């Protein structure tokens, strides 16, 4: 996949940061004929929101400077990679960028990605060239012995006893490695640099290892595979990448990146690596290993569990591509690691959904009320706007009848001070409808309210000429006779602390209340709800239909995921 001239995600000015400043200098000095970036994930897991930051940075820079950005699978380790991850990465990148492209030219980024495995023949020839130059050798040390020989940051390593093999012997052994003559782990190809280097990554690093494993792209063609450090810089070179933008943990790898390219005497210009701080987000984990642990141990339902920070999980939860782009594109690019407050992401999601979500009425925990002075059998159709932020969204009709459901939390028999919802003898307005007064509470044997008997001020209908009477509380409702049942999954933060993986077992901080499932009464228009459409359940939060919903039956089974609450409930909880 390679995209040119992509429009930025919003009309807001493009971000400014140290990497963009460098690119601007290179453009002004005409260092390169065209700026060329890349986003190169390894297909060994699903993408998460940290990758979204890198996607928006690399594709954003390509757009801003009239360049090109490649999606490339760095698929050099078939023992950990799978076609499932290739497909999920492609899907996620296409989804994230497709809405971006809607802002210009109708460009659709549904193109096939590049693969490092496409270059295996060339990479092998580059390795042979290093051997011929005396800059690489075949080593027979075991992994354990190699680690011992490597030394430590505070003491130099020592040369492998196989370091001084002749060029001819190294070429012969490397050819036989390629031909499958040796078992896994018996031999490696290593660079010949400096075992006393203060940078341990320059202490004769491995370039190739033996893996008798089929590859998801090349099948059984190869039994030796290049290491990431060797394949990455040369893939950048082959594709004409000018700015190889990585996260900070690769800063110590940069001297090796440069050494490989310079040692091969390649025609210029060469790519150059730049590093920025990765995204760390509060109340979640971003490590692929830890995310895979959560999936494998079934602590979540899968890689697209809406509680995970994966792009597929966020999409299933109802976060839009535009909200994710706006967050990732403008979050800031620095050289310093830190934790981003998850409230920043949540603000971006609320801001986006407030503009686009269709308003609907739904009661999560129903309590029945009967309006005793409203005629039995009568149904009124009340009009309500679909979105007050969007005039084009129009209106809908909501049925109103004698028997309704309200939210159980909107009634208290013994209310606290400043409780402006329904209480015995108290009045509230039913949104879009009438003011009602609670006259009688019907309870079960345990004394719990099961029904409220109320009277309505039938002259107080919203929008009517006599609707001027004011009460302090307004609550939502649905008509009992017309209500549609739905399963609602109330998702919350996956962890109870902002930095769950700083020490010890991160799983001890899992939030036991990160998912609550309730059976909800919804207004009848939600019977026609659509996947990918976002809804605001008024006074409750933002929701989207889940893919588990059964819509093709005569009796559809609706399932909604809560994307986010209307307000930050965590901030209030932390203040208590």
Image (spheres, helix red, strand yellow):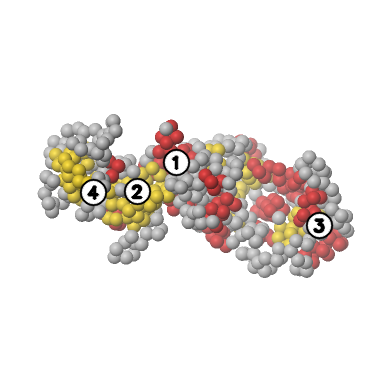
Measuring from the top left, give residue 214's x and y in whole percent: 65, 66
Badge 1 is on which residue? 346
Quadrant housing the N terminus: bottom right
What distance separates the C-alpha of mark 3 from that of mark 1? 51 Å
The reply, left or right, for residue 14 in relation to residue 252 is left
Disc 3 on helix, strand or loop? Answer: loop
Residue 204 in the image: state x and y as whole percent: 79, 50
- Nearer to us in this view, 165 or 18: 165
Query: Where is 521 relative to 501, above or below?
Result: below
Distance from disc 2 to disc 3, alpha carbons, whole Å, reads: 61 Å
Viewer-nearest of discs 3 and 1: 3
- Is residue 116 visible in the rendered image? The answer is yes
Give coordinates of residue 177: x percent, y percent: 77, 65
* Residue drawn 80% across the image and 46% down it: 151
What secondary structure is marked by label 2? strand
Residue of label 4: 444
**Residue that mark 2 sits on:** 535
Query: What residue is at 46 percent from the left and 38 percent from the top?
Result: 343
C-alpha span from label 4 to label 3? 77 Å
């Amino acid at each position: 996949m390679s995209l040119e001239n992509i429009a930025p995600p919003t009309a807001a000015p493009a971000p400014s940061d140290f990497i963009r400043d460098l690119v601007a200098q290179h453009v002004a000095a005409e260092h390169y004929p065209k700026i060329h970036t890349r986003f190169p994930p390894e297909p060994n897991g699903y993408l998460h929101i940290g990758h979204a930051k890198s996607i928006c940075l690399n594709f954003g820079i390509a757009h801003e400077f009239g360049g090109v950005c490649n999606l490339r699978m760095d698929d050099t380790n078939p023992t950990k990679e799978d076609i499932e991850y290739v497909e999920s990465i492609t899907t996620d990148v296409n989804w994230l960028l497709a809405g971006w492209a809607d802002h210009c030219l109708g460009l659709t980024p549904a193109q096939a990605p590049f693969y490092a495995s496409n270059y295996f023949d060339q990479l092998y020839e580059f390795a042979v060239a290093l051997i011929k130059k005396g800059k690489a050798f075949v080593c027979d040390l075991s992994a354990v012995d190699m680690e011992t020989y490597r030394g430590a940051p505070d003491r130099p390593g020592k040369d492998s006893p196989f370091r001084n093999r002749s060029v001819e012997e190294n070429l012969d052994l490397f050819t036989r490695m390629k031909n499958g003559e040796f078992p896994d782990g018996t031999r490696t190809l290593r660079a010949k640099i400096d075992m006393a280097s203060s940078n341990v990554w320059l202490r004769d690093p491995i370039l190739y290892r033996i893996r008798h494993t089929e590859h998801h792209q090349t099948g059984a063609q190869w039994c030796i595979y290049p290491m990431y450090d060797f394949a990455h810089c040369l893939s950048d070179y082959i594709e004409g990448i000018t700015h190889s933008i990585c996260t900070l943990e690769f800063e110590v790898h940069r001297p090796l990146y440069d050494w490989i390219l310079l040692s091969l005497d390649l025609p210029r210009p060469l790519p150059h690596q730049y590093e920025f701080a990765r995204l760390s987000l509060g109340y979640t984990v971003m490590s692929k290993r830890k995310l895979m642990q959560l999936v494998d141990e079934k602590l979540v339902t899968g890689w697209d569990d809406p509680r995970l920070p994966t792009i597929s999980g966020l999409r299933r939860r109802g976060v839009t591509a535009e909200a994710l782009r706006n967050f990732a594109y403008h979050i800031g690019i620095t050289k310093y690691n830190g934790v981003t407050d998850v409230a920043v992401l949540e603000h971006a999601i609320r801001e986006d959904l407030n503009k686009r979500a269709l308003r609907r009425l739904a009661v999560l925990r129903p309590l029945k009320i009967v309006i005793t002075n409203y005629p039995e059998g009568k149904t009124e159709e009340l009009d309500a706007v679909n979105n007050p932020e969007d005039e084009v969204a129009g209106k809908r009709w909501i049925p109103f009848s004698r028997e309704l459901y309200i939210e159980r939390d909107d009634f208290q028999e013994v209310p606290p001070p400043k409780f402006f919802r329904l209480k015995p003898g108290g009045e509230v307005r039913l949104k879009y409808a009438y003011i009602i007064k609670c006259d009688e509470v019907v309870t079960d044997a345990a004394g719990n309210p099961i029904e409220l008997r109320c009277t309505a001020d039938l002259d107080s209908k919203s929008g009517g000429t006599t609707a001027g009477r004011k009460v302090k509380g307004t609550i939502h409702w649905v008509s009992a006779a017309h209500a549609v049942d739905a399963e609602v999954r109330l998702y919350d933060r996956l962890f109870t602390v902002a930095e769950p993986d700083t020490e010890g077992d991160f799983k001890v901080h899992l939030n036991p209340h990160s998912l609550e499932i309730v059976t909800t009464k919804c207004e009848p228009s939600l019977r026609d709800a659509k996947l990918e459409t976002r809804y605001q359940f008024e006074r409750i939060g933002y929701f989207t239909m889940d893919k588990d919903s059964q819509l093709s039956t005569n009796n559809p089974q609706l399932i909604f995921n809560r994307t986010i609450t209307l307000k930050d409930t965590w901030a209030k909880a932390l203040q208590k």
